[in-house]
Amino acid sequence: MKKLILLVAAAVLLAAGCQTLPIKTKVPARPAGQENVLGLTADPIANVRVGIVGLGDRGGWAAVRLTYVPGCTVAAVCDIEADRVETACRRVEERGCARPAEYVGEKAYLDLCKSDDIDLVYICTDWKMHVPIALAAMENGKHAAVEVPSATNLQECWALVNMSEKTRKHCAILENCCYDFFEMSALAVAQAGVFGDIVHAEGAYIHNLGPWWGGYYKNWRMEFNTEYRGDVYATHGLGPVCQALNIHRGDRLKTLVSMDTDAFTGRKMTGNPNFANGDQTSTLIRTEKGKTILIQHNVMNPRFYDRMYQLVGTEGYAGKYPVEQILLSSEMDETGEVNAKDLVEEVPLSPEQMEMLFARYPTPVLTPELTELAKEVGGHGGMDYIMDYRLIYCLNNGLPLDEDVYDLAEWSCIGELSRISIEHGSAPVEFPDFTRGDWNKVDGFHYAFAE
């Protein structure tokens, strides 16, 4: 009896102890013959022939936007709806460009991916089709660029990582918020050390989609939220702050905990008592080097649009919402230089001072010419154009992309990891290391340029 009591007590203590440990996620062994694709380069392509799959709002206007990007051609367009293909072709022709090849049907993307006239498959379909198309592209020797979230679960993330490593083809995440003017400028100031060590960051996707749910083909986005619980759309908030924290370039995402509200609005809107996703999901992440990130998701409630972008450093702060602000612990002189000896109160810089600071520490991407053209072409104020420009520029010059397949996996896996945490009482969940131990072999995030 005494032995049995001891065994039961040990089991209880073990169970209690396990609750404090992170839930581990599997990291499969790298297949034989594969190597990491950190800093992956490919042969330069003087004119990138782009095949766009998915011609709804995002893909349809991407076809037009890419006609303004030097060094590429919209060579093919594909959709399951013939009228969307026709509309995209007409828009490209109106720009004075040759009519793209046309692919229509649910499996037509396979023929596009097999075409010898395509270098890059640009994927703008519903989320569930992102991975099958990207895998088909790389299997057929094409680079892939995938809208967000690029994958919906860990299995899909690993499939894209393995295929990119196997084929040595790029698999980029089309995260336009990494190219917002404020985010890029704040990143440049942070990289110059003005904010000191970045110790905490915040990001979000808070956007009331109520008036627009019906605008999605067969309302697929509402259906996704009906089925899936967690932060299913984390990349807009997470991407820019991960670049500022050098994730898998000297630091890595280590653990998260998530919590959500009940699905008050989803159940009311659909009449489905089993609607899965809560109105609000909040996720707190800790990195390997002891920094934290707060990510939020809410597409249900009447709130102002907010990506919550914030960088909190030991010597300064940057925040975009509700107004753009910079706060420094030191004075800045008339040239924009920061004097660490003269501490100031918690007063944000004036707009004129912010402009001066950004001018002193400019982001190398935003030349005056590119900035002017991006604003003229548009796409979320110009950041869509800059995203496309950088993607094509890097492919033209055989350079590493700004966002690689590990970024894609790390930013997209929040969907499943947050669900796991929520369904286990907000327990901590461990991030898989998609680089398989190589997260600290690159020294910091940077943009590549041709010499």
Image (cartoon, rainbow, N blue to C red):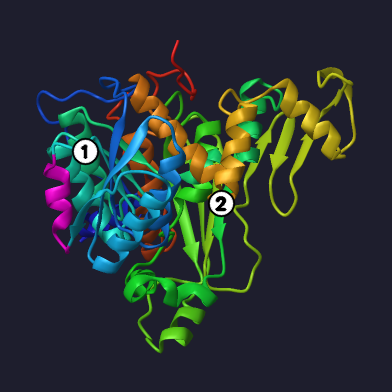
Q: Residue at x 37, y 42 (%)?
A: 173
Foreground: 312 or 88?
A: 88
Q: Residues within 10 Å of mark 2 (few under 14, many from 20)?
A: few
Q: Residue at x 27, y 48 (%)?
A: 100
User: In the current view of this chain or complex, which residue is farthest to the left?
Assistant: 32
The answer to if 38 sits in the magenta stretch is no
Foreground: 98 or 263?
A: 98
Q: Which residue is mark 2?
A: 380
Q: Which residue is mark 1?
A: 118
> Dividing the picture into quarters, in which one does residue 228 lie?
bottom left
Percent of width and height locating residue 131? 23, 50
The answer to whether any part of residue 344 appears in the image is yes
Q: Residue at x 54, y 43 (%)?
A: 383
Residue bounds of the magenta highlight: 105-115
The answer to if 113 sits in the magenta stretch is yes
Percent of width and height locating residue 393? 41, 27
